[in-house]
Amino acid sequence: PQFLNSSYRGNEIRTALYADYALTVSDRLTITPGTRWEHDGFSGESLWSPRFNATFELNSATRLTAATGIFYQHPRFLQLAANPANTRLKNERSTQISFGISRLLTNNVRASVEAYYQSLDRLVIRRSRTTGQANNSGTGHTAGLDFLLGRRLLGKWYGQLTYSFQRSKRDDNFGAGVYNSDYHRPHVFNTLFSYDFTDRLSLAGKWRFASGRPTDAFIVHTNVLNDDSQLRFSKEITGINIGRLPNFHTLNLRMDYLFRINGLNVITFLDIINVYARENVDSLVFQERTGRNILRGLGAFPQFGVKLEF
């Protein structure tokens, strides 16, 4: 326990300012340069993030877009608290670029395709699983394509189909080499449908499919304490994220009912998550006493609530 327990207390100020300017070059071309400045009191950093995007109207139905910029992300407080040496971890950095095309197929149906690439550096890497000490040695990249086909709400129903193909790699830069990131799910497909029975009652559904999350390869060692009266197992990782959990898919349904009380909109809703109760595995948790991995994931469950609109 003396190597695992840690407490952290700190008070700092984080400040951010952002400005951009949309410049209409012509009837078809609009460019928007911008910049963000932020100061992180925890890391002591003052960071500038230039950004730029442009939109070009090919015609009344087709639009081209391009964007690039630098983005920063604060270390999580759990990472700062894991070890006293982590209190000065720097912000992680992402340099991004994307290109897209969007076309109106009919008056209410639009299709779009977007390609993107992200170069990542200064990623927070836990150097030691025992002490929790971390640094900003990590690098990586993410690239992908997003496809969308959507019908806007016209009449009683709305629908949308999306598909994403992506690759996401990381390198901790301390000998393990390049490996799949925890978010490396090559295929993600979503379909969304909403139907208004009346101006008060509506039903929406969403079905999602995704490649299973990456998982480590490992071997299990038995009786690591060499004591039959206190039998313990250990898990030795032999490959980072080279395996994959089962594919994920789920159907969610939501019913909304609206009524009014003296100008106040009261919306009651019922969600049923994972309608057909598929056991989607989200992670594996190793049990030192049994030497087995426990599969963890959410099953089916309902949730309900009330939303007020003034």
Image (cartoon, helix red, strand yellow):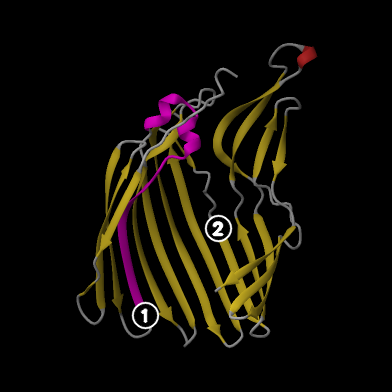
Tell me which amino acid carries mark 2: His
Q: Residue furthest top?
A: 227
- Secondary structure of the residue carrying numbered label 1: strand
Q: Which residue is mark 1?
A: 62
136 on left or right of 301: left
Image quarter hosting the C terminus:
bottom right
Decide: is 217 above or below 26. above
x 53%, y 44%: residue: 182
Q: Which residue is mark 2?
A: 187
The image position of residue 181, as x and y in percent, is 49, 43
148 on left or right of 275: left
Q: In front: 189, or 19?
A: 19
x 31%, y 62%: residue: 67
The image position of residue 216, as x and y in percent, is 59, 36
Task: Name which quarter of the figure residue 117 lies in.
Answer: bottom left
The image position of residue 20, as x and y in percent, is 26, 63
57 on left or right of 2: left
Cα distance between the residues tagged 2 and 1: 27 Å
Tell me which amino acid carries mark 1: Thr
* The magenta segment: 62-88
- 76 inside magenta stretch: yes
Decide: is 263 above or below 119. below
Q: Residues within 10 Å of mark 1 (few under 14, many from 20)?
A: some
Image quarter hosting the N terminus:
top right
